[in-house]
């Protein structure tokens, strides 16, 4: 059923998780689609509460759902709060997917993460690598919750014929990112470190680990565009990778961030800290074959992200 077309025009579309980086980008992107965008403010509904979710969907009657709501964080947050990452994410996705099926939602897109794949998956990682080996231990709790979400969509498709699909983005960055050093991902953490090193006149900034792991990054606006594209053009049981198709080492990334921020000092490495997975590049050929490709280059995307950070850091 790849290539099945779904028209968003005139539809009531719920972006679950609209306050998050991806959700906010989806809201911006959907403004071009002539649809009615629904959002559920955090104060109004706890997505971990089954009755609240069921009641909200029953009253608001979305026809399409982008399930972008999740508890997210970097290595440190995942490693120190595993119960929250597993429980909260399981509840959020299960409640929304079940409510969608019960209320006859026409289409749902579940948003996962590239951390679902085995730590030592062959590179670039194809969709078929799922469940072929052990996960990266530092974020396995989050990964297991996301794998459960993919399987829920597949199960509801198989048992009820629900048009529920899943997309797995690579590492995302951009406006709305989390710049808290205790819980942030690598790009905002590096950007904040470089910014503070620049302000403090530091001789060098320090990165975690050896700097040799390779990572792929996709701008969140590109991700939102790909998700809307998949909602409109894809219907199938397999999850689809959403990536840029290129990767850089953490050291290369750090030097790029330093250049964008304007920090002219040196780069130090704290090798007592974990590296995580040695390489993580997604095979995005399925998405390319469907007809989508990214449009924002890494350096210009980083520059725009730093401008956003400067405007919003207070």
Image (spheres, grey):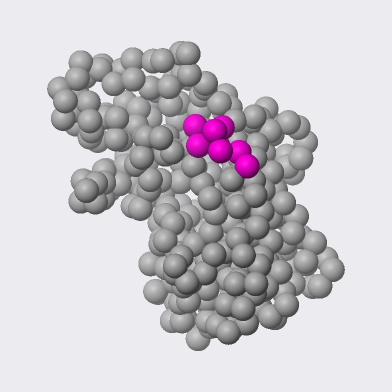
Q: Position of residue 121 (x, y in %)?
A: 68, 31
Which image quadrant is residue 32 in? bottom left
Residue 18 x %, y %: 45, 64
> Which residue is at 31% across, 17% downward?
267
Magenta segment range? 76-83
- Identified at 60% across, 52% down, the residue is 88
Please indicate whether residue 223 sits to the left or right of residue 128 in the image: left
State the image coordinates of residue 295 (x, y, percent, origin top left). Answer: 40, 53
Return the residue nearer the eye: 284 or 308. 308
If the image is split into quadrants, where does the N terminus sit?
bottom right
The percent position of residue 238, horizontal first and vertical second, equals 73, 55
For residue 285, say whether it is visible. no
**Is most of the magenta stretch helix, strand or loop?**
helix
Residue 30, can we see it?
yes
Examine the structure image and report whether residue 88 is included in the region drawn in magenta. Answer: no
244 or 27, which lies in front?
27
Position above or below: 88 against 283:
below
């Amino acid at each position: 059923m790849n290539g099945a077309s779904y028209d968003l025009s005139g539809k009531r579309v719920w972006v679950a998780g609209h306050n998050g980086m991806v959700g906010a980008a989806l809201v911006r992107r959907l403004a071009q689609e002539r649809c009615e965008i629904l959002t559920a403010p955090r104060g109004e509904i706890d997505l971990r509460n089954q009755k609240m979710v069921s009641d909200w969907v029953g009253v608001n009657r979305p026809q399409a759902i982008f399930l972008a709501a999740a508890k997210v964080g970097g290595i440190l947050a995942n490693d120190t709060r595993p119960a929250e990452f597993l429980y909260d994410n399981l509840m959020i996705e299960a409640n929304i997917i079940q409510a969608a099926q019960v209320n006859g939602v026409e289409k749902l897109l579940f948003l996962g993460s590239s951390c679902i794949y085995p730590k030592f998956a062959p590179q670039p990682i194809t969709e078929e690598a799922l469940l072929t080996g052990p996960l990266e231990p530092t974020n396995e709790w989050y990964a297991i919750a996301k794998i459960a979400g993919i399987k829920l969509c597949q199960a509801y498709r198989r048992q009820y014929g629900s048009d529920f699909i899943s997309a797995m983005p690579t590492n995302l960055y951009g406006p709305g990112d989390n710049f808290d050093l205790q819980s942030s991902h690598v790009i905002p953490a590096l950007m904040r470190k470089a910014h503070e090193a620049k302000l403090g006149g530091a001789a060098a900034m320090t990165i975690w680990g050896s700097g040799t792991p390779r990572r792929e990054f996709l701008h969140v606006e590109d991700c939102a565009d790909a998700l809307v594209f998949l909602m409109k053009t894809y219907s199938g049981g397999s999850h689809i990778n959403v990536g840029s198709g290129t990767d850089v080492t953490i050291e290369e990334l750090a030097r790029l961030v330093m250049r964008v921020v304007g920090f002219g000092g040196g780069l130090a490495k704290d090798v007592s800290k974990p590296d995580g997975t040695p390489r993580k590049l997604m095979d995005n050929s399925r998405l390319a074959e469907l007809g989508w490709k990214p449009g924002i280059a890494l350096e210009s995307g980083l520059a725009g992200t730093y401008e956003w950070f400067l405007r919003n850091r207070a």
